[in-house]
Every structure is written in C-alpha cells, then in structure tokens.
Image (tube, rainbow, N blue to C red):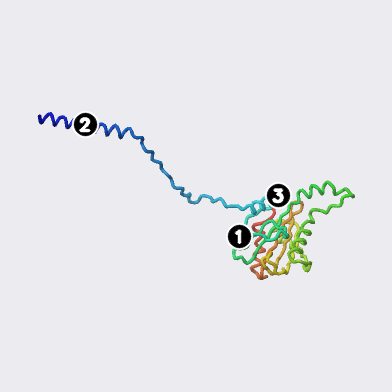
C-alpha cells in the first residue's frame, strides 16, 4: 500500500510542476526599453538663439552688404519710442553705454536714380548724399533742436568701416525716459557709395575715454563688406 501512495504523490507533484511551467511560458514577455540620457557632446557647437528683432536687423544688413558680429557680453535692448527710426539696439556689458543702429540699402535707390537722372522734369537727389539727410534727421529727433554742428569723419575712421563718407554729431540730450535719461549722444552717419548707409547713436552719461573706446570698437563688429 505504501509504494502505491508514494507513486501517486509523485504523479501529483509532476502534474503541478507541468501546469506551472505551461502557465509561465504562456505569459507574454515584458519588453525592456533602454532609455538613453541625452548627454551633450563635449566641444559640440552651440546654436545661438536669435531674436526676431536681431533676425530682421541681419536681413537689413545683408541687403546693404554689411557684416554683423557682436561680441559676447553685449545685451539686446528695446527702443522705447517709434519716433526714433532705428532698427536695433544693444548695450555694453557694463551697461554704461547704449548703441542704436539704423541701416539702409542704397541699391534700389540707385536703380531708380539711374532711370531718371537725365530727365530734367524729375529732380532726384543723388543717393550717395543719403547719409547727410539720415544723420541730420536722427540728430534733430534725439536732441529736439538743431543746436549741433556736423563734423566730417576722418578718412582713417572711414577706412575701418570700409566706407567712403561720413559725419558725426555730438548732442546734448533732453532728460527723457525714451532715451533712458542719458545726457549725451554721439551720432555717426557712415556710407559706402552705391551700397548703403549706417547710422549709429551712441548714448552715455560721461564723455570719458571709456566711452570713446566703445565708439572706436564699433567698426570691429559692424562694417561694410570689402569689394
């Protein structure tokens, strides 16, 4: 009798094991998904974020054959009034000087001028005099009067901008929030013949050597293309 019971017990154990095995292998296997963390590659180039304001300004400079390469540390700022027809503005890293830029291509103006310059019925100004009107207009708008004297920019400075002509205007500014209560502005109107015009307004509260150093540095990152 005992051998029969022992044999029956082994049959039950074998059947239970077989049932467990069939159940286990019939379950769907869980997929293991490996998630790789995004690790930036050392030394990989970083794509700078370009604001809409800067993008529009770069489009204007391209049309006027002007190169733009602002150094690190300069901060984009907003022009608070639409009365000032400037296209882009930045401030220096120490926030002691602000620079506003206006750019105009002369290529289309020259095409129109060539069509009518010999027609006595149509009086059109030579486009290469544009820098004088643009510079004077911006100086008058900023100062609120005509109490300033235009000065020709030296050939040495013009060469640094790859330009042909230019004038400067040193202004005393009215105390206005639109110009952030700056006391002074130096306006530069620079032109490359048949190509384009750049007007730059440089704002400061101190007409010290550091201010003029900042002005001299402008030609390093904004100038006409050679040729």
Find the distance from the CA under tag 1 to the CA under tag 3.
24 Å
Q: Quadrant of residue 79?
A: bottom right
Closer mark to the observer between disc 3 and disc 2: 2
Of 144 and 198, nearer the camera is 144
Residue at x 83% of width, y 46% of height: 115
Residue at x 85% of width, y 48% of height: 116
**Within 10 angstroms of label 2, few (less than 14), some, or many (20 or more) residues?**
few
Of 201 and 158, nearer the camera is 201
144 on left or right of 45 = right
10 on left or right of 84 = left
Of 69 and 204, nearer the camera is 204
Residue at x 79% of width, y 59% of height: 133
Earlier along the polypeptide chain: callout 1 or callout 3? Answer: 3
SS of the residue under disc 3: helix
Find the distance from the CA under tag 1 to the CA under tag 2.
80 Å
Find the distance from the CA under tag 3 to the CA under tag 2.
87 Å
Q: Is residue 225 visible?
A: no
Q: Position of residue 208 (x, y in %)?
A: 66, 70
Q: Which mark is residue 63?
A: 3
Q: Quadrant of residue 86?
A: bottom right
Q: Which mark is residue 14?
A: 2
SS of the residue under disc 1: strand
Q: Position of residue 10 (x, y in %)?
A: 17, 31
Label pair 1/3, CB-CB below 8 angstroms: no
The residue pinned by badge 1 equals 75
């Amino acid at each position: 009798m005992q051998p029969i019971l022992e044999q029956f017990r082994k049959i039950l154990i074998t059947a239970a094991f077989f049932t467990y095995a069939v159940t286990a292998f019939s379950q769907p296997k869980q997929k293991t998904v490996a998630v790789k963390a995004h690790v930036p590659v050392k030394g990989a180039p970083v794509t700078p974020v370009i604001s809409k304001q800067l993008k529009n300004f770069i489009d204007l400079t391209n049309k006027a054959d002007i190169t733009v390469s602002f150094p690190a540390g300069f901060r984009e700022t907003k022009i608070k009034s639409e009365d000032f027809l400037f296209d882009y503005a930045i401030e220096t890293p120490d926030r002691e000087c602000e620079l506003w830029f206006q750019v105009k291509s002369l290529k289309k103006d020259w095409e129109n001028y060539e069509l009518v310059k010999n027609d006595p019925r149509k009086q059109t100004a030579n486009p290469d005099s544009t820098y004088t009107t643009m510079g004077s207009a911006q100086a008058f708008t900023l100062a609120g009067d005509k109490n300033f004297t235009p000065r020709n920019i030296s050939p040495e400075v013009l060469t640094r901008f790859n330009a042909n002509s230019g004038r400067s205007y040193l202004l005393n500014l009215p105390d206005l929030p639109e110009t952030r209560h700056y006391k002074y502005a130096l306006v530069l109107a620079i032109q490359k013949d048949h190509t384009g015009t750049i007007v730059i307004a440089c704002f400061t509260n101190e007409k010290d050597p550091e201010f003029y150093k900042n002005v001299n540095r402008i030609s390093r990152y904004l100038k006409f293309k050679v040729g």
